[in-house]
Image: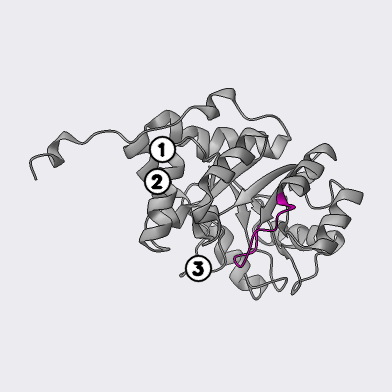
Amino acid sequence: MIDVHSHILPGLDDGSPDLEESIAMVRLAAETGTTDIVATPHSDLQFTFDPAIVEAKIAELSQAVEGLIRIHYGCDFHLHYENIQDALAHPYKYSIDHNGYVLVEFSELLIVKTSDGVLERMRAAGMTPIITHPERNVVLQNRIDQLGTWAASGCCLQVTAQSLLGQFGRRAKSFTEELMKRGLVHLVASDGHDLKQRPPRLDEACALVREQYGEATAKRLFTTNPAAVLAGEMLPEEETEAVRPRRRWWRLSG
């Protein structure tokens, strides 16, 4: 499995506080079946994103875990004016492995009217926005049609593994299920921040998707699509098809 969203680098944001915690997080990811993980520290009004520091932290952590897992470059990119202008001027600065896919986090307070234009400009500059955890954003929960429009225009949607398991509440879980039903989920990632509350593990969510939606869907969301993201390649065309949960006949009589 490939995890395209995590906060495993020490001391850069609200994720891992130190190298010891980072090492433990990477080991947990590897022990639960993750082979590749993208380190995506925040770039927002609170945390400054410096590519050189990110690269150095990745090298330090990779050496500390002795190649136990492949750690990739990335950023949790927040949509605000300064960030947008810088990304348009330097399209690959914030993208995963500098290959074009960018994690994009929207504000939970409002979605500005210019969002469509911003996403379009990012795509025109060579970036493919990956809208992160819309199921946890109270504003986007009420804009599923707009999410569909963004997906149809070339954006991707990434949901959090714990949302599938109900660990972010009923509303996040039900919205994730609706996104799955409409075929709007392109990637599942951990958004791991620590070892206990928000761990960097995908195995339980992958098992649930495999059980409810089938092996092909699980492989696409946890392996095939993330691999395409790392390589900067287009996602498989079948991703546009909606996926529906399998019926469980034994529940009908319960």
Give neighbour class at mark 2: few <14, some 14-19, many 20+ (Cα, 10 Å).
Answer: many
Residue 137 visible in the snapshot = yes
Tell which tag, 3 or 1, sits nearer the viewer. 1
Task: Identify the secondary structure beneath mark 1.
Answer: helix
Pointer 1 residue: 181
Q: Earlier in the sequence, mark 2 or mark 3?
A: 2
As displayed, is residue 98 above or below residue 166?
Answer: above
In percent of width and height, residue 207 lies at 37, 43
Q: Quadrant of residue 66?
A: bottom right
Q: Residue at x 84, y 59 (%)?
A: 51
Task: Identify the secondary structure beneath mark 3.
Answer: loop
In percent of width and height, residue 180 lies at 44, 40
Query: How many angstroms separate mark 1 from mark 2 (CA)?
Result: 6 Å
Q: Earlier in the sequence, mark 3 or mark 1?
A: 1
42 within the magenta span: no
Pointer 3 residue: 195
